[in-house]
Image (tube, helix red, strand yellow):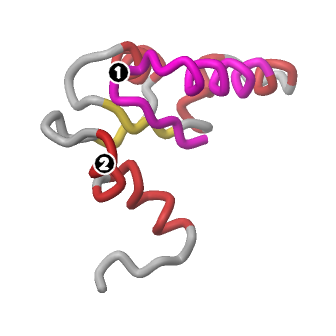
């Protein structure tokens, strides 16, 4: 599950992630295994999602601190989904 939030407190993102966590727990997946199910894209140094990534050992991609809003699609925010969609990022 790819979770994207620079602050880690975006209400819609937190709500969706809570639903996914509940479903994982219903399937018997414990918190120590969450690192195998999530990738976070967040602020490189601060924020709730960064703290959670450290706590759970989740792999992260950084949203550059000086990039925001509509331009974030040109960072890992948009590049990882593009790669999964088969878009050649090198061209």
Q: Is residue 10 above or below residue 39?
A: above
Left or right of residue 44, residue 17 in this image: right
| Residue 58 x, y percent position in the rendering | 45, 31
User: Sequence order check: which comes first, mark 1 or mark 2?
Assistant: 1
Identify the residue at horizontal 47%, vertical 66% (top origin).
Answer: 82
Left or right of residue 31, residue 82 in this image: left
- Judged from this view, the residue extending furthest toward the left is 66
Q: Is 80 a magenta residue?
A: no
Identify the residue at horizontal 52%, vertical 36% (top origin).
Answer: 3
Under circle 1, the secondary element is loop
User: For residue 14, what is the image quadrant?
Assistant: top right
| Residue 36 x, y percent position in the rendering | 58, 37
Residue 72: mark? 2
Q: Is residue 72 above or below residue 29?
A: below
Callout 2 environment at 10 Å: few (<14), some (14 to 19), or many (20+)? some
Q: CA distance from mark 1 to mark 2?
A: 13 Å
**Is label 1 in contact with label 2 (beta carbons under 8 Å)?**
no
Q: Quadrant of the N terminus?
A: top right
Under circle 2, the secondary element is helix
Per the rendered image, the range of residues in magenta is 1-22
């Amino acid at each position: 599950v790819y979770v994207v939030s620079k602050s880690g407190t975006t209400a819609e993102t937190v709500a969706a992630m809570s639903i996914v966590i509940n479903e994982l727990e219903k399937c018997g997946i414990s918190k120590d295994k969450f690192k195998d199910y999530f990738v976070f894209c967040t602020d490189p140094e601060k924020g709730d999602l960064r703290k959670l990534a450290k706590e759970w050992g989740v792999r992260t991609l950084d949203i550059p601190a000086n990039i925001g809003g509509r331009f974030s699609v040109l960072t890992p925010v948009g590049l990882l989904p593009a790669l999964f969609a088969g878009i050649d990022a090198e061209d």
